[in-house]
Image (spheres, grey):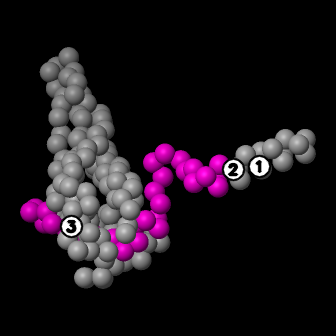
Amino acid sequence: MIQRLLLASLLLILVAGCGYRLAGSIDSTSLAGTRVVDASRSGGGELAWSLEQDLKLRGVPAAAEGEGRRVLRVLGETFERRPLTLTSEARTAEYELVGRAEFELLGGDGRVLIPTRSIMADGVYLRDSARLLGSSQEEARLRSEIRSELVRRILIAVSAVDPS
């Protein structure tokens, strides 16, 4: 029993020592000094706000104007709702909601670290004609989940870039 515990401890130390981390995990230290700028033409800014909030929750200190080593420019966010399936009465039963975001990452000196990149995330929700209010709430919930996934994917891309 003690040998198994020692072996498991040794294995854990070796894995942690080599820098292994779970796929999709975000290294918060590599996000330090990143300033989020809403450069979208629509001016909605919800994605930029969500990115700033996520950075705050991760304990990344906010970079002041002109202080950031890197500037994450959010160029836009769009959502498209498409019918996915139909009922026997030719009414939409399911919708697919597709969220897209465009961003780029600039260094403090203005050089491009990540050229303009478009990412997407999607989800499906049911439309119940008997409960239309519930369907709209379901769409709003899914929209929020998709935005969270877009934020996660953007931060993974940014954290992969060497901050120096």
The disc at residue 111 is: 3
Distance CA(mark 2)–CA(mark 1) = 6 Å
Q: Nearer the viewer, residue 163 or 38?
A: 163
Q: Is residue 139 above or below residue 162?
A: above
Which residue is disc 1 drawn over? 10
Q: Is residue 18 magenta?
A: yes
Q: Which of 63 and 164 is in front in this view?
A: 164
Q: Is residue 67 magenta?
A: no
Distance CA(mark 2)–CA(mark 3) = 38 Å
Can residue 139 be seen here? no
The residue stretch that appears in magenta:
15-43
Q: Name which residue type carries label 3.
A: Arg
Badge 2 element: helix
Q: Name which residue type carries label 1.
A: Leu
* Farthest left residue in view: 41
Q: Where is residue 128 in the image (x, y as percent from the top left)?
A: 27, 34
Q: Are marks 2 and 1 in contact (CB under 8 Å)?
A: yes
Q: Name which residue type carries label 2.
A: Leu
Locate residue 135 relative to residue 90 in the image: left or right.
right
